């Protein structure tokens, strides 16, 4: 699965390059900005932690908020290392002008009966919402899954009132399979989540 090659015919693809063992993808967004998407490296750990703490302050759609991500840079570095070594995991970073603006992490199951399926989380810095960055991160994940031929199902859970994210997933072909009531409790109020999935064939 590492050794993934990009589909050059994807509409926004400007260039794909290899950096060491990592694949990188440069894309031009609708507003002309250049987006770099690549797998996370250990050296990204502290900026991923800072980024994730920032994202937690910007949205109530995640499992953490202003209280923070609760992960140290050392712990993050060891996650990144495990993601780079395990063939059914993927951690992506998106950059504009060298700044981390988006992040996605997908974790496949550990046991043989579940390793073909996994769940992901995706975030984009609020000032960059609506530029197509979420769409590009998700496209990368789907292309990686199709090419690797290990992942046959991509799952997610999303707060049922997170219309922006639900629209993003529907556009990519994800189908809702049910509602979990009281998935989140934020400031004393319960929120449901919707389970969605995409079969990879
Ligand atoms: C959800 C999130 C990742 C989307 O990222 P993004 O970069 O803004 O997404 P895109 O620009 O690719 O837009 C994706 C789609 O969202 C939809 N969308 C955009 N703005 C919207 C709005 N104001 N209302 C409803 N849908 C909207 C559109 O369908 C859009 O696709 P289109 O422009 O091709 O029609 C981002 O908003 C985010 O990080 N939110 C906070 C964290 C979060 O909710 N993560 C998901 C948890 S499950």
Image (tube, grey):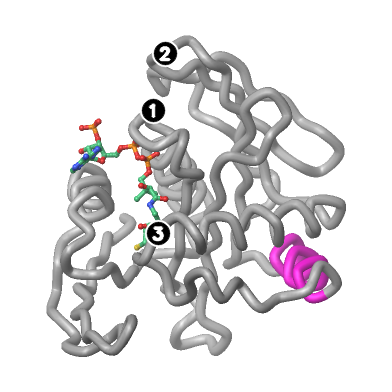
Q: Which residues are magenta?
A: 75-85
Say which of 63 and 93 sits in front. 63
> Mark 2 or 3 closer to N-term?
2
Please name the residue that numbered disc 1 is placed on: 131
User: SS at mark 2?
Assistant: loop
Against 175, is 189 above or below? below
Does the residue tagged 1 have its C-beta within 8 Å of any atom of ligand 1?
yes
Q: Residues within 10 Å of mark 2 (few under 14, many from 20)?
A: few
Q: In the rendered structure, does residue 69 fall within the stretch colored magenta? A: no
Q: Are marks 1 and 3 in contact (CB under 8 Å)?
A: no
Figure quadrant of the C terminus: bottom left
Q: Is residue 100 left or right of residue 169?
A: right
Q: Are marks 2 and 3 in contact (CB under 8 Å)?
A: no
Of circles 1 and 3, the one toward us is 3
Please name the residue that numbered disc 2 is placed on: 31
Could you say where residue 54 lies in the image, as x and y percent from the top left? 58, 55
Residue at the extreme front of the image, as rendered: 187
Could you tell me which residue is drawn at 24 percent across and 48 percent down?
A: 164
Could you say where residue 117 lies in the image, as x and y percent from the top left? 42, 73
Q: CA distance from mark 1 to mark 3?
A: 17 Å
Say which of 91 and 185 sits in front. 185
User: SS at mark 1?
Assistant: loop
For residue 154, which quarter of the picture?
bottom left
> Mark 1 or 2 closer to N-term?
2
For residue 31, which quarter of the picture?
top left
């Amino acid at each position: 699965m590492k050794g993934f090659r990009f589909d050059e015919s994807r509409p926004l693809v400007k260039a794909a390059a290899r950096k060491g063992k990592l694949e990188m993808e440069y894309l031009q967004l609708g507003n002309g900005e250049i987006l770099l998407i690549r797998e996370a490296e250990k050296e990204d750990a502290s900026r991923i932690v800072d980024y994730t703490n920032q994202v937690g302050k910007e949205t109530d759609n995640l499992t953490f908020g202003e209280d923070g991500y609760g992960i140290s840079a050392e712990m993050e570095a060891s996650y990144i290392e495990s993601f780079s070594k395990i063939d059914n995991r993927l951690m992506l970073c998106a950059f504009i002008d060298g700044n981390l603006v988006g992040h996605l992490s997908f974790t496949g199951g550990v046991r043989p009966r579940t390793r073909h399926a996994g769940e992901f989380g995706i975030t984009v810095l609020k000032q960059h919402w609506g530029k197509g960055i979420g769409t590009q991160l998700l496209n990368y994940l789907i292309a990686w899954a199709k090419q690797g031929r290990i992942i046959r199902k991509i799952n997610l859970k999303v707060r049922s009132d997170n219309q922006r994210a639900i629209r993003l997933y529907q556009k990519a072909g994800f189908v809702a399979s049910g509602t979990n009531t009281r998935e989140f409790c934020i400031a004393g109020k319960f929120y449901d989540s919707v389970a969605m999935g995409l079969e990879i064939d």
